[in-house]
Image (cartoon, rainbow, N blue to C red):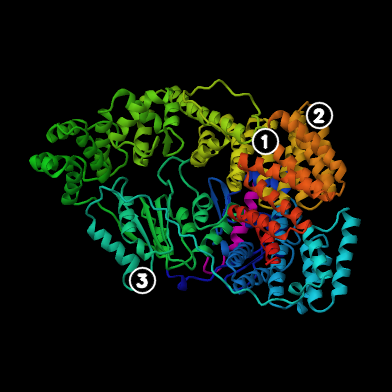
Amino acid sequence: MDPAGAPPAARYQLLGPVEVRSAYGERLALGTPMQVRLLAVLMSQPGTGWSIDQLVDELWQGRPPKTAAGNVKTYVWALRRALRSPGFPDPAILAGPTGYRLALDGLTVDSVAFDDLAQRGYSALRHCHWSAAQESFEAALALWRGEPFAGLPGWGVLLSVRARLQEQRSSLAEEVADLQLRAGRHHELIEPLRSQVNDDPLRERPWGQLMVALARTGRRADALATYRQLRHLLAEEVGVEPGPDLQHLHTRILRAERELLTPDPRPPERTAPRIVPRQLPAPPTLFTGRAAELARLTTLLLGDSRSASTVVITGTGGVGKSWLALRWAHDNLHHFPDGQLHVDLGGFGTATQEASPSAVVVRSLLPALGVKPLEIPAEPAAQFALYRSLTADRRLLVLLDNARDAEQVRPLLPGSTRCGVLVTSRHTLPGLVATDGAHPLALDLPSDDEARHLLVRRLGTQRAAAQPAAVDELIRRTARLPLALSIVAARAAARPTFPLQAIADDLAASRGGLAALATDDAATDVRTVLSWSYRLLSADAARLFRQISLHPAADVSAAAAASLAGAPPHLIRPALDELTRANLLAEQSPNRFRCHDLLRAYGEELTYALDRPADRSAVRRRVLDHYLRVARDAARLVDPGWQPLDPPHPPTDASPSAFADHRAALAWFTIEQRVLLAAVDDAVTHGSDAHAGDLAQALTPLLSRLSQWHDLAAVQAIAVTVAQRRGDPRAEALAHRDLALAHIQHRRFGAAHHHLRRAMARYEQAGDRPGQASAHLHLAWLSDIEGDAGAALPHAREALALASSADDRLGEAAALNALGWSHARLDEHARAIAYCEQALALYEEAEDRLGAAHTWDSLGFAYHGLGKHPTAADCYRRALALYSDVQDPCGRADTLVRLGDTHQAVGDHDTSVDLWRQALAILDRVGHPQATVLSERLEAYR
């Protein structure tokens, strides 16, 4: 459908009272307060499924009536009726396997539009496009009509989403003020900034902006009085001094620095180097023919004055859809100068292989476009909106391979008609064609000549010409299906002395095996080819082929394959080589293999037909044991203080673990991350909740070290569910605590408090004192991030008491360091040093380098507060050495900033600026929100 002819969309509004306006601006009557609250929950995370149990918990907060589940269904029915409007006869609330969800174009929800505009503004800001940034920020702020979900009780998800949105709104208002100061509009800023500091007096940045605005209007005395007012307020309310940035600003106003008092014209807008992704796999080496289809793709995507388009290549499994898409893509790279994106959506593999649109955007597309982990929004709708924004002005080629349906593809369509999109699928995806303007291209079997050419390229002209009748029979027996042809050709090429007719006769004798993989004739014939190829395998290779079909992901390492087989790696290597020669596996890189999804389906069919259920369960258990054991080894090396909740069971896999150090462990995890996440899903799918929960625990230090907070949140949400199902309060507590960690990194402080309270309750229920201490330490950290060092202190004290009573030495060390840090933040530096020195002794005794790094950093902060700058600098340098050793970039960046502060305090401006620049490079690389603050500080010293 032409978007220009589509009816206007309804608008869903939560930035103020919850309202829905029809396509024609009329406010819809939503019904009872409980119906409005239910709709608000669904609107808080558009597209996310909510089970009945989750909705009951959100609506009644643990005290539901007996009829709660029925009430929810009634509310949904009533809302569906209320939300129908002219042009939109279908209900916006859909039911699916994950529960009820609000099925909307994300930008029709004002909170998602707000996120999208904010991300556009920040992108423009990073590229120094000041006007575009201000325009986006102001448009985002104009969407607000009041407090989010105004009039609804603040608990559960509404509380956390409300807190997140309000924090984002405040940050955007501050960004706008900075841009207005850059533009010399200080006169008109004074009154709005006064209102802002009165509304939220503990946010320091607006105070600084007000001081600058006053100073630039010739009111230096008022600017200095404003600083004194803030200093008095902070001393009375929280017992702290203004931060170093404000102290420095105060000094500059006292000195009447000309650069501060006279606004410079905006620096010239510049364009930062744009990342050009090159994600396409290598072109298929055996591709031949398909001239008509290649020409049709060129016409659809490039011809007839069309700038670009979306094409859906459809056909049976193994017909060569991916080969065709890759061949055309590689032949036309020059038409897409902004890069190429590629994703295997896994639509026809197992359930755990199938990629959700959100996971694809977070793990593949946004990082490829240069978005750092912490810059990725938490909500899927906002992620999709950011993806569309980043592709809106580019000319990209996007290859979405192996799609299941239109719903999986639609959120991944780029935001520009200048982009070309190639989708491959065994289904025709009529919804994508009808509503999104995609062009279908049905891929049939290759012609006899094309099939013959493929065989000749592999077998050689002389051999094929000498036996033309046998070549014709091989083509007929394989039904001209490219996947089957490649398998037959591989078998023939591996036996150069065999007559081709003997191979054809052998293939003919294989007919009539197990049932066909599908109902069409081509699939029946390829089933014959696979059966024949499988029958020619040795017993060991055949067994391994069946076992590999049970692996959680399509790609498998040699070590994981050894675990599937229950044999040492050197003993299964011949079987892996045999499967590779037979084209049943592809060795993508040394000791790493991939299996086509059609071959995996065939292998799974075989194992269910030939192997006992107990044997299949043992295979799955061995590979999960392998990943759990190796992940635990890696976690211990990356974080020496990490320990599993339960002692390891005797291993059932035979593969060795060989990590020389934490660097090797992180390198392994970088390669295996997606497989490990799939293993968690696979464990849940096949009823192995214990493996799922244990593996989720082991992934926390690994995902944290690489700042993979979205994946940490996803895996810990699963861990919470399986722990509740198993009735394991300690495991549930740990999962809540680690889920809170992900929320803290996303600045979703309300949600973090919620999960930490849940963690504390479960630890208390289990009588786990070290766990309670850990929860208190996280609460102390959260309070400190929120700017309340006074609130952090009691949590740190309670953590120390609990860890000491449980003889938890590393817990004591962490609590002592937290106490030291909190006292230093409260200007009690001597006490801080005493606590930190005790912590350092415990960490060094345990050889915990990461804990020691944190503590040396705390000592540096305390000595800096005492004015002992050389000692502070020495402490910071010790921390930096340890952070480098353990590969903790964020810890290193924080310490570089503070070491720069120390050099600044003694007048060594050049060194401080150099250190801050080093820190900014790290923070930029991981997308940390502090990068913007540090960048602004550096601008003041240009």
Where is residue 906 drawn, in percent x and y? 78, 56
Residue 445, magenta (yes or no) = no
First in sequence: mark 3 vs mark 1:
3
Predominant secondary structure, magenta span: helix
Residue furthest top as drawn: 650
Front position in the image: 272 or 688: 272
852 on left or right of 552: right
- Residue 804, label in figure: 2
Q: Amino acid at mark 1?
A: Arg
Disc number placed over residue 849 in the picture, else none: 1
Q: Is residue 308 visible?
A: yes
Quarter of the image with the C terminus in it: bottom right
Q: Residues within 10 Å of mark 2 (few under 14, many from 20)?
A: some
Q: Nearer the viewer, mark 1 or mark 2?
A: 1
Q: Which tag, 3 or 2, sits closer to the chain's start?
A: 3
Near mark 1 (Cα within 10 A), the count class, few <14, some 14-19 or many ≥20, is: many
